Structures are given as C-alpha cells and as structure tokens.
Image (cartoon, rainbow, N blue to C red):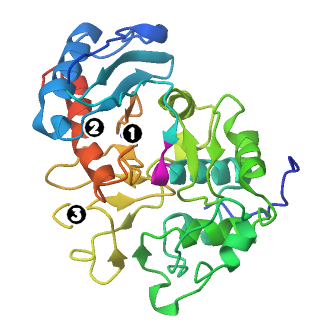
C-alpha cells in the first residue's frame, strides 16, 4: 500500500417498529449552553420526529444520531415493518456524495496555514469546467479514471459556473499528486489528514462519491470539525456560490437540490440557506440517502444513515427528514 504523501503546491490564502435510544451517551453535554431545552427534551423531540414525521416515515428504515464535539448525545434505529433491513451506527454503506465533504476537508488540511488557492476553491465549489464525469471502476486509479470516457473533459462553457459533477474533484486530485492511487491507497492517504480514527474505504477511486463507511466513523469526522481539530471546521460555509439555475442569473447550470429551494455550495459541502426553509446548516447528502450535517452555530452534528439504490432522490429525501430531526433537537419541539 502506497502511503507516501503526494506533492502539494502552495496556494495563496484565500443523512418503524422498534426504536433504540442512546440519550446522553458519549459524554455529550449542554453545560455552558444558553437557556433552552435540555438534553432530555431535545432527545424526546428528535426521537418523536424521527419515528412519526411523514418525511421520516417516507425514508424508513434508517439510523440517526446527534452529538456535539464531545460525543454522541442521542440516536435511534427506525425500522420498517416487514423489512429485514436495519441500520445502526456500525452499518457500513456507500455514502456517495457525502464523500465530497471528506475530500474537501482533506484538501483544506493539506494546504495548511497557506490556505486554499483560487484554483482549489474553483474546483471545490464546482466551477472548474470539468463537468462530464461518468464513473470510475473499482480497479482503476485516480488517474486512469480521469483518463477514461469523458471524465477529464473540460467544457469552457461551464467554467466559472456552478454545476454539480464528480469531475471537479477527480481532476483536482489528479492534478495534485493522487493519480497513482487506487482504492486502498486513496483511503490511506485521506486518513493521513482526517485521522486514522476516521476509518474509510473506497469502492472506486472517485473522490466525489466513492467512500464506504459507517455513521460512527463519519461522526468522528464531524466532531473534529466542531472541536477544531480539522481546519474544515473554520472553513465551513466559506467561498459560497449560488446553485439554483432558476435564481442565479446565469451563474449556475445544474443542482441535485429541487429548484423550489435555493441552497449555496461551499468547499465540498452545502449550506442550507434557502430563504424560506433553510436554517443555514452545513451538509453533504449522498445520492443513496446518507445525510450528515453540522448546525449553523457549529454546536451540534447529526447523521441520517441509510442506503437506497432504487430512489434517485434518496439523498434529498433523507435531507428533508434530517433537517426536521435537527429542528426538533434545536427547539425541543417535535416536528
């Protein structure tokens, strides 16, 4: 396994039948918090919402958890009557586009104090013009995937405009020393920056969508953002761009978010900033339904974990459920 760190160029700064609950686990605490609902109230509200809200009933079965920088505070497995499928914190699954947040954090950590370059930002908030990505295969490397099909094709007409596409990150990785890495070596390389405790694997060497992991491992990553152990914590929401083709005055070409909502995109993650229903949370929903988030105040993290290959909108559906669980937690009121 190749664990050699690649050369990096310096840049200028610039996601019911039984429900299991783990309230107050892992040392989570509201100590020093402003007045508001206590952890018991928050847990009850979130649990009720996960089990009963129609947006959450629609995505059963799933597992959810919420915590803070110190650890897990509440969780539950929401099952589906008649289904043998269940999820818990240790269920390994394909997280699809939730991979993007991990790669973004890797790049931010690699750049260090120098910060992201203007080119990095353009690749990480999806305005680079590399918008013809199809897929990688398991035995490829980062570089051979870029060279396959139209994956590395540059389109001048999309340069400078937001278009949600895996090509941005794939080409960026290729340009920055990761060309030779296959699945195992790529996972090892990301862990050099995210930490070996954030245990990930790749099903294909695709930076924007190839990661397999479980909720507990992803939660370790999110806690590092909240606790300041990773630079992405400070970079959350930075360099935002408009993403809705209907409202962005020609600066956005395509988004997986339904166009009746307008979110922004930062470096490898969404900002749920819709004027009507957004709460400013940071998130990275995956196409198969894995939905991780950090609240706008960077105090809590949450995850809705499930895997649905049949529904093309599974990620959005998990986000609709997850944001209501988040609202229930923040307010102490079931949604």
Instruction: Let me know if residue 118 is in the magenta part.
Output: no
Say few, some or many: other residues with alpha carbon within 10 Å of mark 1 (under 14 / 14 to 19 / 20 or more).
many
Q: CA distance from mark 1 to mark 2?
A: 8 Å
Would you say the residues marked 1 and 2 are in contact, meaning their CB atoms lie under 8 Å apart?
A: yes
Quadrant where the C terminus is found in the figure: top left
What is the secondary structure assignment of the residue under circle 1? strand
**Vertical order, 198 against 162 (above or below):** above
* Residue 16 placement (x, y as % from top left): 20, 24
The residue that label 3 is drawn on is 258
Quarter-of-image position of residue 40 = top left
Mark 1 — residue?
293
Q: CA distance from mark 3 to mark 1?
A: 18 Å
**Mark carried by residue 322:** 2
Specify start and end residues of the magenta stretch as a single range.
94-98
Residue 157 versus residue 10: which sits nearer the camera?
Answer: 157
Q: Please tell me which of labels 1 and 2 falls first in the chain.
A: 1
Where residue 268 appears, as percent x and y from the top left, is: 50, 56
Secondary element at image label 2? helix
């Amino acid at each position: 396994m190749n664990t050699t760190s690649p050369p990096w160029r310096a840049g200028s700064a610039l996601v019911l039948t039984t429900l299991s609950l783990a309230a107050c686990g892992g040392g989570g605490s509201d100590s020093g918090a402003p007045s508001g609902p206590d952890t018991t109230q928050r847990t009850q509200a979130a649990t009720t919402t996960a089990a009963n809200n129609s947006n959450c009933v629609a995505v059963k079965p799933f597992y959810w958890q919420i915590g803070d920088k110190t650890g897990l505070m509440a969780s539950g497995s929401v099952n589906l009557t008649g289904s043998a499928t269940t999820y818990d914190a240790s269920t390994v699954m394909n997280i699809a586009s939730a991979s993007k947040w991990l790669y973004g954090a890797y790049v931010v950590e690699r750049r260090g104090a120098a910060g992201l370059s203007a080119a990095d930002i353009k690749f990480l908030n999806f305005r680079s013009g590399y918008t013809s990505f199809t897929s990688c295969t398991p035995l490829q490397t980062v570089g051979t995937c870029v060279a396959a099909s139209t994956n590395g094709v540059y389109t001048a007409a999309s340069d400078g405009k937001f278009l949600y596409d895996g090509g941005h990150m794939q080409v960026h990785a290729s340009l920055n020393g990761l060309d030779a890495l296959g699945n195992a070596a790529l996972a090892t390389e990301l862990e050099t920056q995210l930490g070996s405790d954030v245990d990930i694997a790749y099903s294909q060497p695709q930076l924007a969508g190839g990661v397999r992991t479980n909720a507990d491992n992803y939660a370790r990553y999110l806690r590092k953002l909240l606790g300041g152990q990773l630079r992405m914590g400070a970079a959350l929401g930075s360099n935002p761009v408009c993403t809705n083709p209907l409202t962005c005055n020609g600066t956005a070409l395509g988004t997986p978010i339904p166009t009746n909502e307008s979110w922004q995109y930062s470096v490898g993650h969404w900002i749920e900033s819709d004027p009507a229903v957004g709460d400013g949370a940071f998130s990275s929903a995956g196409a198969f339904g894995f939905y991780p988030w950090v609240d706008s105040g960077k105090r809590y993290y949450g995850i809705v974990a499930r895997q649905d290959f049949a529904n093309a909108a599974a990620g959005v559906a998990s986000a609709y459920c997850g944001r209501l669980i988040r609202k229930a937690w923040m307010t102490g009121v079931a949604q």
